[in-house]
Amino acid sequence: MGRLRPFRALTTTLVSVSVSRARLTGLVALGALAVVVGFAIGAAGPSSATQAGADLVNAYGLTILAPIVTLVIASATLGDCLEDNTLVYLWLRPIPRALIVASAGAAALLTAGPTVVVSLVIAAALTGGGGTLVAATALAAILAVVGYLGLFVLLGLLTKRPLAWGVLYILIWEGFIARAGTSSSQLSIQYYARSVLAEMAEVSLRLGDASIGVAVVVPVAAMVVGLAAATFRLRHLSVA
């Protein structure tokens, strides 16, 4: 209970820091686009609604929506505090650095998670792909957010331009290099989220062939490693 109270307080504070009206409007618009496309697919009545819905979730949800939303939110949790010199106030209390980073991760998850998952679940449902596709979409989306979360919290502490570097990472590594072949794709968060989607929905997706167990464990491990690195960075960061 001694650690739970400051964790809750920090998480609430960092949620308010990372979610501005402008950011929320933009991210909701990205999510709404998925819903519109899902509705259009459902209205068209494709011969294989499940495959069409999975293609939408993969091509837009896991490739654009999940990484972009997580980048915007996660990089801001501590990055905004560092940029406007308010991070120093956290030093005034005897709060472990690991607790600060864990709170940032929780804040990003509580904000980016629902934004991504709700939008994609509604979009998947509207395609007419069925309950299995909806369940697969929900798990794949949350794993994508979890996998990116640690990396982007860390990025907010490493550079003054986390959005620019994050977008470059998403476009160049996730969008190009990791799609060149199986070996490089295994170093991509999208590979594992895509594998969960393909396995659970029983559809065919290129570079989505990891086992369900591995596809669940790797994004969680990536989050833990990213948050651990962010904790190390925070311990050696001068914010005075």
Image: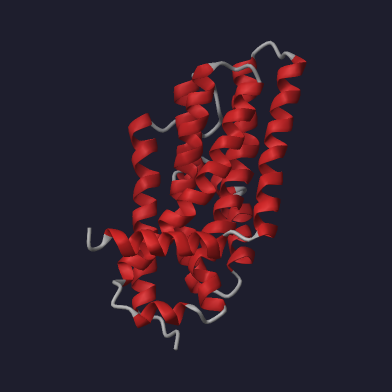
Give the total number of marks visible in the rendering. 0
Do we see residue 208 in this rendering? no
Residue 47 to residue 19: above or below: above
Q: Does 174 sit above or below residue 141?
A: below
Residue drawn 48% across the image and 72% down it: 157
User: Looking at the image, which residue is at 33% across and 65% down?
Assistant: 6
Does residue 161 appear in the picture of this structure?
Answer: yes
Which residue shows up at 70% across the image and 38% down it?
32
The quadrant in which the C terminus is found is bottom left
In this view, the residue farthest toward the left is 1
Residue occupying the far bottom of the picture: 240
Residue, x 62% and y 44% (percent of image)? 65
Is 68 displayed left or right of 218 in the figure? right
Q: Provide residue 75's location: percent of width, then percent of height.
A: 53, 63
Q: How is the image coloured?
A: secondary structure
Would residue 224 be found to the left or right of residue 115 on screen? Answer: left
Q: Position of residue 133 (x, y in %)?
A: 53, 22
Residue placed most toward the observer, 230 or 109: 109
Q: Where does residue 212 sit, x and y in percent of width and height?
A: 37, 30
x%, y% of residue 235?
34, 77
Between 50 and 120, the one lying in front of the other is 120
Residue 168: quadrant of the picture: bottom right
Query: In which quadrant is the N terminus drawn?
Result: bottom left
